[in-house]
Amino acid sequence: MIVIVPLSAMAAPYAAYVMDARTGKVIHSQNADTRLHPASLTKMMTLYIAFEAIKRGEISLDSKVTISKKAAAEPPSKLGLRAGQRIALRYLIRAAAVKSANDAATAIGEAIGGSEARFARRMNRTAKALGMNRTTFKNMHGLTEAGHLSTAHDMSIMGRHLLYDFPEYYNLFSRVTADAGVRKVSHTNRRFLNSYKGADGIKTGYTRAAGFNLTASAERGSERIIVTVFGGKSTTSRNAQVTKLMDLGFRRAPSRAPLRKPQKPVYADVETSPSTPSTNPGSVAGGAGKTIRLVGAVKKSKRPQLRPGTAAPVLVATVQEPLVTNADITAALKEAVKTPEPQAAPVPNVTLAAAGGAVLRPALRPSSAATKPAAKRQKRVVEQEIVTRVSTSGGRHWGVNVGRFPSRYAAEKVLLKTALAEMSTLDGSLRKVVRRPQGFDANFLGMTRETADLACRRLAARQISCFMIGPG
């Protein structure tokens, strides 16, 4: 029997890279820094940016994406989307990750970046920030295009960042099948996932110019290996080569190694004007002059508007002129989060009655009243206990928690720093420290659900841990 292999696939250059995922150290390398066509391995970056955009609040998994004519016209592999069709982002992500659908990948890029060119610029900025120094993206799906090139080394870096930067989404790459909204889709790498012990991802790719590519990851015990192969002659031979390299990686990798997760990308700060499309990876789809700052010191804190009838002091400082002293901050912290302390119950006096019973009498205040006759004593004034409650008017039953800390002072300090950093959504909320058996919770209370959700998303974009607190 004669097997005919396409000449273009035979001509595709071979490259391979084997990495210990725990440390990022190379175990094997062959032509790993040669710039080649990545094919659908490109979608790893498309999905990485999608996860990043969801985390920053630019878009949500339930956002409805309108399919453009360009996305609908992409060649296979595809989901079969129609121009004008609206579909939730979560289904597009599943189709791109599992089926490697080109129309879904294009729709994701257009929804986040506004256009293919703008999204490609964001891909390249992200690649540079990740250390993928020999990668250039021109589109979001990986179909062959002049200048759209990467390396086996860079794609291994990409796979490692997907694994450690977004572990909550990584399970997508091991699903043999998935619901993509319009239909059920099957994984393009299901043969390797089903045949190799410990395999759990990541992405396949094929074009005539690229050959059969694969970035794969597998875990056995405490060891995890990432392998990338470019230029395979067929699915079968490529999988066999990846299996061979995986075995090599597990043999050579140390049984114990420290887990050193890769650093998340840090982007240069970019200003965007309304007339200039945004190239910032943090910008909202479409540009429109809105930019999420990822790096850059705050020059000046704006004064929040005071509520009618209040005259609360506001601490304002600039980088050049720090007007607030440590003593001022300490005093402000204590005042801002001060909670009513429970008053101690009166200690009863016990006087033996003639009949042998016990008569309980409240203890006298420390004053001269104790020496006066009972008839001349003034009536005891009962002090009222003032209880501060969070207003629940207008649905303000919600709040956010920004962490649990070993001391009240540490929680108060974080509350004030967070309030100054995120004035737009936290202004008007109550800063409150709640003591728990495990530590002190730092909470902002008295917010609407929408405000609490927006505050958490904005804090998450600043790398501040946050979760919402519901009513009760």
Image (tube, helix red, strand yellow):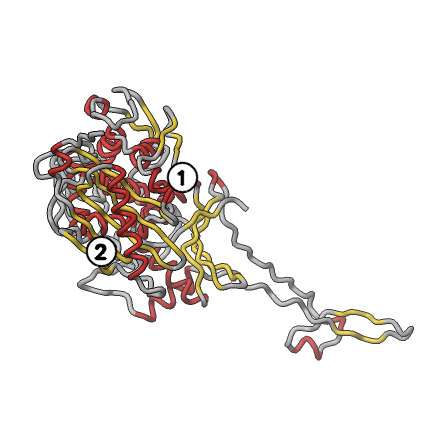
Q: Is residue 465 above or below residue 96?
A: below
Specify the label residue 298 is tagged with.
Answer: 2
Looking at this view, is 456 or 99 the one in front? 99
Q: Residue 255 occupies which quadrant of the picture? A: bottom left
Image coordinates of residue 295 in percent, x first then y, are 21, 54
Looking at this view, is 233 or 274 the one in front? 233
Image coordinates of residue 288 in percent, x first then y, are 19, 35
**Residue furthest toward the bottom?**
371
Residue at image point 68% right, 66% down: 380
The secondary structure type at the circle numbered 2 is loop
Three-letter residue code for mark 2 = Val
Return the residue at label 1.
Answer: 450
Q: Is residue 412 above or below residue 287?
A: below
**Residue furthest toward the right?**
355
Image coordinates of residue 75 in percent, x first then y, are 20, 25
Dot 2 crowding, Cα within 10 Å, few <14, some 14–19, many 20+: few
- Spatial CA distance of label 2 from label 1 is 26 Å
Three-letter residue code for mark 1 = Glu
